Each structure stands twice: as C-alpha cells, then as structure tokens.
Amino acid sequence: MPIQKITREEILTKCVERFRTHGFHRTTMNDLAEVCGLQKGSFYHYFRCKDEILHEGLVQTRDFFADHIFTIAYDNDILPQERMKSMLASHVAIMLRGNGGCLVANVSAETLNSTPEFMPLLREISDRWHAALTHILRSCRPSEEAESIAWRIMQDIEGAVMLSRLYANEQFTTEAVERSVAYCT
C-alpha cells in the first residue's frame, strides 16, 4: 500500500467514522491504519493507541456539535419551535449518515464498563445537548419542566435513531423531531 499524505484531522475523521460503524472494541489499529491509507508503522507516528484516537475524536465531535449544532439553540432571534426543529434535524442527519448511528450513544454503551475514562467526555457532550434543548424549552416552559422535557427528547431521539436504522425507516426520527417541536408550543 503506498504511503499517502494525510492530515491528523483527516485521520481523526476517518477513525471516528470507523468507530461509529464498527465499534471501538472491534476496531484494531491495523483497521484504522488501513481506513486512512497508511501503513501501520506510519500510523503510529500520529497516534500511540486507539484510546488516544477515540479521545481526540470525541473532543472533535464535542467541538463540532458545540460550534455547528448546539449554537442553533442559542439564536434567540429565531422562534423556539424553529430552533428545535433545525437543531434536531441537523443532529439526526449526522446520526443517520453512513452506517453507524450516534457515536456518543454507541461508545457510551460499548465502553461504559471497560473504558470508564471516556465517560466524563461523553457526559460533557450529552450535558451540552441537554443544555441546548433546555435553553430552547425555557422560552415556553418553566425551568424545571424544560430540563425534564430535554432529557425526554434526548431519549426519544436516540431511540428513534436506533429504530430508523433497525427498520430502515426514517419516519421514526421524523416523528421524534415533530414530537420535540410540539413541546415548544
């Protein structure tokens, strides 16, 4: 295999996609090197181990969602129902892209007992999602109720993504987004 020029960011993106589609434990360093078009020895020039790659991939995911998805919630010039629909539709589109579902949910389920050092970062991502939803909902609901509904929306969306994948039917996610928007009325 010829050695290719690739940036660390491109490697992270490809590795995160591999983790999303094949899981953390089922992916080897050989798999990651191959998906990046690198020889295994060259791959170690960029990363020492899978844990380091996943950690940086989760940081990259956290930052992407913070900068491009969750910011929608804080644009108070847009009606709450429009913010909710736009943010969740963008979020769901990412989770349904490719063959993997939600990276945060998948990694949480897979590594909870085996690799607990990922939990603080996974919780931070989930907490930011919850905060964004809560912010939108506080426009039309009391604070405590908004927080509770935000957790319910997260559960609904995650379940809908799983069912959409399982039954190859995006109607599950479409309806979950619609139910979430209805909380804003």
Image (spheres, grey):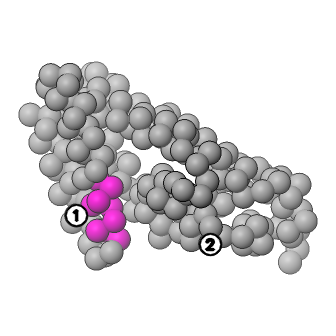
Pair 1/2: label in front: 2
Residue 168, how many percent across, how many down? 31, 75
Q: Does 179 sit left or right of 53 as displayed? A: left
Count of numbered tags: 2
* Between discs 1 and 2, the one toward the N terminus: 2
Indicate the secondary structure of the residue bearing disc 2.
loop
As displayed, is residue 99 above or below residue 92? below
Residue 153 visible somewhere in the drawing: yes
Any magenta on residue 160? yes
As displayed, is residue 55 above or below residue 41? above
The kind of secondary structure the magenta stretch mainly shows is helix
Residue 124, how many percent across, how many down? 49, 36
Q: Identify the residue under disc 1.
A: 172
As displayed, is residue 157 above or below residue 19? above
The residue positioned 27% from the left and 41% from the top of the image is: 151
Q: Which residues are magenta?
A: 157-165
Residue type, mark 2 in image: Arg
Indicate the secondary structure of the residue bearing disc 1.
helix
Q: Identify the residue under disc 2.
A: 26
Residue type, mark 1 in image: Phe
Q: Does 184 sit left or right of 133 as displayed? A: left
